[in-house]
């Protein structure tokens, strides 16, 4: 008997659509940063380029000069972005960090940003805040920003080109 049929017979209706729904029922489901793929045909494999395109769909991506201007001391403090460096310690020490950014490694990003987690970073003040994720080259940060949007941070964005793009634009970096 197929898994879907077996689950439909032995599980409540909410679990009849596969093991992912069973996890939903128990509150154990972990959603992908780029979305739920229940509407995908079974066995449909996505490429990393498709995942990245999905993550970036509707995502605001700031150029280094746009981010620098938003961080400028003359900008309204309420509109200043919180720049979140999601890279590991070795990368931050090797290349430096954007001045004023905070380090929240990718592996704990959702817990340190979700205001209901009990472990949120003190710099994360509200779901209305502009959070800009930063990685080395601007790829992982797109997935991170998409994940933050799923948490309710509608203004989450990422930096085009990452720290490398920032440095290439002649903008300053500081040692952590």
Image (tube, rainbow, N blue to C red):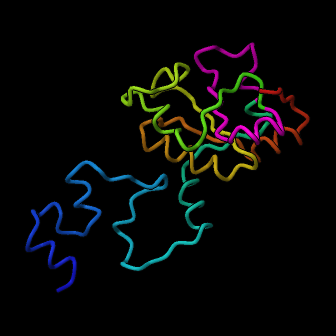
Residue under the image location 22 percent in, 78 percent down: 3
Count of numbered badges drawn on the protein: 0
**Start and end of the magenta stretch?**
68-96
Residue under the image location 53 percent in, 59 percent down: 54
The N terminus appears in which quarter of the rendering?
bottom left
Residue 169 lies in quadrant: top right
Above or below residue 156? Residue 143 is below
Q: Nearer the viewer, residue 20 or 76?
A: 20
Above or below residue 99? Residue 30 is below
Q: Viewed as shown, does residue 83 lie left or right of 72?
A: left
Residue 118 lies in quadrant: top left
Q: Which of 145 and 27 is in front in this view?
A: 27
- Give residue 25's position: percent from left, percent from top: 20, 53
Tell me if residue 136 is in the magenta stretch: no
Q: Residue furthest front?
A: 90
Q: Residue furthest bottom?
A: 1
Q: Which of 169 and 84 is in front in this view?
A: 84
Q: Nearer the viewer, residue 153 or 140?
A: 140
Residue under the image location 18 percent in, 63 percent down: 15
Above or below residue 35? Residue 11 is below
- Give residue 140's position: percent from left, percent from top: 64, 51
Above or below residue 49? Residue 152 is above
- Give residue 130's position: percent from left, percent from top: 57, 29
Residue 150 lies in quadrant: top left
Q: Viewed as shown, does residue 67 lie left or right of 114?
A: right
Tell me if residue 82 is in the magenta stretch: yes
Q: Viewed as shown, does residue 171 lie left or right of 18?
A: right
- Give residue 9's position: percent from left, percent from top: 8, 74
């Amino acid at each position: 008997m197929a898994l879907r049929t077996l689950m439909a017979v032995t599980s409540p209706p909410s679990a009849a659509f596969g093991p992912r729904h069973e996890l939903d029922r128990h509150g154990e489901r972990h959603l992908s940063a780029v979305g739920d793929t229940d509407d995908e045909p079974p066995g449909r494999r996505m490429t990393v380029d498709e995942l990245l395109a999905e993550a970036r769909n509707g995502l605001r991506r700031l150029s280094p000069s746009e981010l620098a201007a938003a961080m400028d001391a003359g900008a309204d403090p309420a509109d200043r972005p919180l720049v979140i460096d999601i890279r590991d310690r070795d990368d931050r020490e090797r290349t430096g960090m954007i001045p004023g950014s905070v380090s929240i490694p990718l592996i704990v990003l959702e817990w340190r940003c979700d205001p209901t987690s009990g472990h949120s970073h003190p710099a994360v003040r509200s779901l209305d805040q502009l959070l800009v994720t930063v990685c080395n080259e601007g790829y992982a940060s797109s997935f991170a920003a998409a994940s933050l949007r799923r948490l309710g941070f509608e203004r989450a964005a990422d930096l085009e080109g990452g720290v490398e793009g920032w440095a290439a634009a002649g903008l300053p970096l500081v040692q952590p």
